[in-house]
Amino acid sequence: MALVNIHFLNLQQNYLFADIAKKVNAFKVMHPKADVISLGIGDVTQPLAPAVVEAMHKAANEMATAEGFHGYGPEQGYDFLREAILKNDFLPRGIHLDIDEVFINDGAKSDTGNFQELLHWDNFIGVTDPIYPVYIDSNVMIGRCGIYQGGRWTNVRYLPTTAENGFIPELPKGRPVDVIYLCYPNNPTGTVITKQELRKWVNYALKNDALILYDAAYQAYIRDPEIPHSIYEIRGARKCAVEFHSFSKTAGFTGVRCGYTIVPKDVSVSTFEGERIPLNQLWLRRQCTKFNGTSYISQRAAEAIFTPEGKQQIQATIDYYMDNAHRMLTKLRALGYEVYGGKNAPYIWMRTPDGMGSWQFFEAMLYGANVVCTPGVGFGPSGEGYVRFTAFGSHEKTEEALTRIENWTKKH
Ligand SMILES: *Cc1c(COP(=O)(O)O)cnc(C)c1O
């Protein structure tokens, strides 16, 4: 008899964005003429940079010849891309990594979800709350989170980040956590972490022999020169942190699929007997078994991001989105809303007015202004009473959405 992995049955309802789509579709059925604008899901809208497209064409042409054909590539990625990453994303920040500490992936969702496989099932995990749902759900699937009670998992340490603590999570008190997920710039709150605050986490991990899984998917949106782009800007991090990067938000690769993960050779975890096991070798072993590499064309596309034209072109698109973020912050603030983020990240995190619930506000704005946001509580219990707006729309749609929100807000 084939038995199911019962941990999957513990997962909560649907994926958040499936729930949102269901509610939006219900609205559209009732109002077929309404033109709904989505500032909800975190997908980009602007086309790929010309330098990237050119590299893809070139790679496709190579694949059409016997000499230029590429079959299976190295599971950990081609050296041309790994070298470009080291040279552009790390060396200028004074971070020296080895080429075999870089693992090319097919997007950071896979690796942030899969990495927990290397860890014993009863590690105690900590997450800042609200957070990208993948971290918790992937741990639920392996049975690491306990049971779901009152909107939270019994074996997860939630570290609230809210307006009340200035979106600065406190270090865990009581039972130390073994594994900590951090995401900065943060999805969903759009807030960032200073070097000083990040240093506290690295020191905590070193002191407690904990592992930090650091998601830097939005580092390209950082504008403040004091804010760290990588956890390896902090001394000691290469002993305790793994870092995930993605070209999805950096360069519009959500449909191309490429990113990378840094697993320093100095990061190790323990057996019960106290033997230290380096995660770099373990991750390589895992990838060679379960992953056959990111496509050659995607990796050539990613390499083009690091050319002078590529850099300039992707920066122009990031500036375009950040211009949206600025307009949203300014307008929503002028309307009297309490808004956060949006300065070093493409997300605006807004407190709902009059203590409304996240879903209640989501529906009110959908029906009143035909604009879609993401209910904050979908990202964790501390997200209740907030909603998220993304800056990934076009200028036109963003302006139109803001005008509708303005008219709707003034009616109340
Ligand atoms: C979008 C996103 C990712 C990256 O997703 P890809 O799989 O690379 O497209 C990773 N982490 C967070 C927090 C994200 O929002």
Image (cartoon, helix red, strand yellow):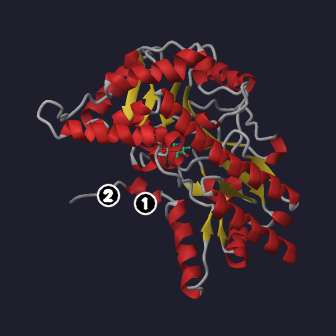
Of callouts 1 and 2, the N-terminal one: 2
Which one is in front, 4 or 381?
381
Residue 161, horizontal then vertical, whole percent: 73, 43
- Cβ atoms at labels 1 and 2 below 8 Å apart: yes
Decide if residue 298 is in sight here.
no
Vertical relation: 131 (above or below) 293:
below
Vertical relation: 97 (above or below) 106:
above
Q: CA distance from mark 1 to mark 2?
A: 9 Å
Residue plotted at (31% across, 32% down): 287
Residue plotted at (66% across, 19% down): 203
Tell me, for residue 4, which label it has, or none. 2
Q: Quadrant of residue 334 in the image? A: bottom right
Image quarter hosting the C terminus? bottom right
Left or right, 5 with reference to 230: left
Left or right, 38 with reference to 272: right
Residue 321, horizontal then vertical, whole percent: 63, 48
Q: Circle 1 sits in a helix, a strand or a loop, which is it?
A: helix
Q: Which residue is mark 1?
A: 9
